[in-house]
Amino acid sequence: MRTPKERDVSPSALSRPCAEASSFPELLKAWRQKRRLSQLGLALQSGVSQRHVSFLESGRARPSRTMILQLSETLEVPLRDRNDWLVAAGFAPVFRARPLDDPQMKAVLDELAPHQDPDTLWSAEDAALVPVLPLDLRRGDLRVSFFTVIATFGTAQDVTADELRIEFFFAADAATEKLFRQASGARSNL
């Protein structure tokens, strides 16, 4: 029998480890384990006693709304999942989840529009993405090299804005930079 660390885990289970969990104790434990923290580690980082964390995970204690938000902040739980925690504990969700075409999201989409076609925007379920990714493309003799940066809204208070990811491509070498500067110069002369 394999230990929990040796079990095969599907990519969807990694992105949202507690999708099947329905009770607050299960959600708390799943996220604590995802972040690879012991109960003591979570207690030290969140300023809560280890005993209280244990009682919350076992269901012997009921969390307050403040406690849920404090622990989810410490564990860097995405806003959508924080709402799930609140609902599982019997509270109303705190964070709104507006669709991308909501009038109040217009300012976000207007800001993003010059950078990416709004129809192709997508959201990732997990905010723990690699910040820089090298990318080399070749076609025949042409070679371009980029690194990408994926940006998120750090102070988002809306589920949709929290899940948006913006990817920027930057030249990773002088030859690629020269090629694109020449192309943009030729384009601006048209």
Image: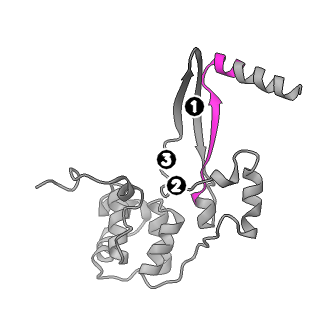
Of the numbered discs 1 and 3, the one sitting upstream in the chain is 3
CB-based contact (under 8 Å), mark 1 and mark 3: no
Proximity of marks 2 and 3: CB atoms separated by less than 8 Å: yes
Which of the numbered marks, if any, corresponds to residue 124?
A: 2
Sequence-wise first label, 2 or 3: 2
Amino acid type, mark 1: Phe
Circle 3 residue: 129
Residue 60 seen anywhere in this rendered image of the structure: yes
Determine if the magenta segment contains residue 169. Answer: yes
**Disc 2 element:** loop
Q: Is residue 85 above or below residue 39?
A: below
The boundaries of the magenta stretch are 163-178
Locate residue 49, reporting x and y percent.
Answer: 35, 70
Q: Residue at x 49, y 84 (%)?
A: 91
Q: Nearer the viewer, residue 144 or 88?
A: 144
Other residues around mark 1 within 10 Å, as few (<14) / some (14–19) / many (≥20)? some
